[in-house]
Image (cartoon, rainbow, N blue to C red):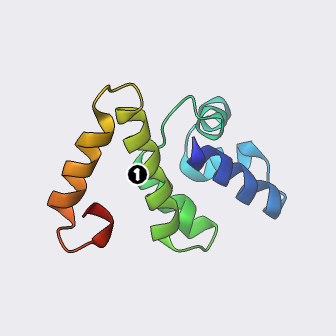
Amino acid sequence: MRLGKQLKLLREQKGLLQRELAAELKIDTPMYSKIERGTRRAKKQQVIQLAAFFSIKEEVLVSIWLADQIVDLLKEEKHGQSGLLIAGRDLYPNCKTWK
């Protein structure tokens, strides 16, 4: 999962421990560790909290969080690619990527 890797990078750049971020989110350290390892999904509100904590744009972390969810949903689907293309066209009809 991309979000976990990004959170680990941000945490290490600040010299923080996992328990410090867990305390910020009001969760236990093992749960936060699972988020970083990608074995547990963060909640959207937690992602927003972390963006504020790290003083980065909310859009950056929320976009990564959304991408992880899409990948998890579609990675095992036989028709995932075509489903994604249809959804993209519906959501963003003026985007040249979907043409």
Q: Residue 62: name its quadrant.
A: bottom left
In the image, taking residue 32 as reference, residue 95 lies left or right, namely: left
Identify which residue, 3 or 55, lies in the foreground: 3
Query: What residue occupies the far front of the structure in this picture?
Result: 99
Identify which residue, 8 or 23, lies in the foreground: 8
Quadrant assignment for the N terminus: top right
Query: What residue occupies the far right of the structure in this picture?
Result: 15
Quadrant assignment for the C terminus: bottom left
- Please provide percent x and percent y for residue 81: 32, 40
- Label 1 packing within 10 angstroms: few (<14), some (14-19), many (20+): few
Badge 1 element: helix
* Vertical relation: 63 (above or below) 78: below
In the image, taking residue 14 as reference, residue 52 lies left or right, namely: left
Q: In percent of the image, x 72 and y 59: which residue is there? A: 10
Q: In percent of the image, x 35 and y 34: which residue is there? A: 73
Q: In percent of the image, x 46 and y 44: which residue is there? A: 68
Q: In percent of the image, x 67 and y 47: which residue is there? A: 5
- Please provide percent x and percent y for residue 51: 55, 65
Q: Residue 43: name its quadrant.
A: top left
In the image, taking residue 5 as reference, residue 62 lies left or right, namely: left
- Please provide percent x and percent y for residue 92: 21, 67
> Count the marks: how many?
1
* Vertical relation: 59 (above or below) 42: below
Looking at numbered disc 1 in the image, what kind of residue is underneath it?
Leu
* Vertical relation: 78 (above or below) 74: above
- Please provide percent x and percent y for residue 47: 49, 55
Q: Name the residue under label 1.
A: 66
